[in-house]
Image (cartoon, rainbow, N blue to C red):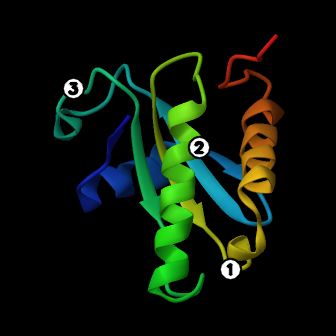
Amino acid sequence: MQSLKTTQQFNYLYKKGMRIHSKFFTMYSLPLDGLPKFFSYPSTSLLGLSVSKKVGNAVQRNLIKRRVRSLFKNIHLEKERVIVFVAKAGITQLKYKDLKQQVLACLYRKTKPLVMRHA
């Protein structure tokens, strides 16, 4: 999974992406097909992380980013997608297991699940 780099890419997802809300985070998601040229035609999913200073100090913010990257590496999306993960205050209280459950619950909640269910 590659990462989003430019402000233009993030802003496009904020405006056009499907929003998935949780108490601890918000995710924006779009399929890869039909993206504008400034995404450089990626072949794999893209992940953008936004963890503001409201979440905590630098150590806590980096911990959240490492956990979210690890979590998305282990999730098998049905289609390759572009995802922006925006952390909210209080997310540092979640353990990795709880964060994973919250993310999976949000991805399953939509009428068209974004994640393949495990047998």
Q: In the drawing, what numbered circle is on residue 41?
A: 3
Q: In the drawing, what numbered circle is on residue 89?
A: 1
Sequence order check: which comes first, mark 1 or mark 2? 2
Residue type indicated by callout 1: Ala
- Residue 58 place in picture, x, y as percent: 45, 84
71 lies above or below 11: above
Sequence order check: which comes first, mark 3 or mark 2? 3
Residue type indicated by callout 3: Tyr
Q: Which residue is mark 2?
A: 71
Q: Residue at image x 73%, y 21%?
A: 112
Mark 1 and 2 residues: CB-CB less than 8 Å, in contact?
no
78 lies above or below 66: above
In-front residue for pair 46/39: 46
In-front residue for pair 82/8: 82
Secondary structure of the residue carrying tag 2 is helix
Q: Residue at image x 40%, y 30%?
A: 45
- Residue 78 place in picture, x, y as percent: 59, 16
Q: Residue at image x 68%, y 79%?
A: 89
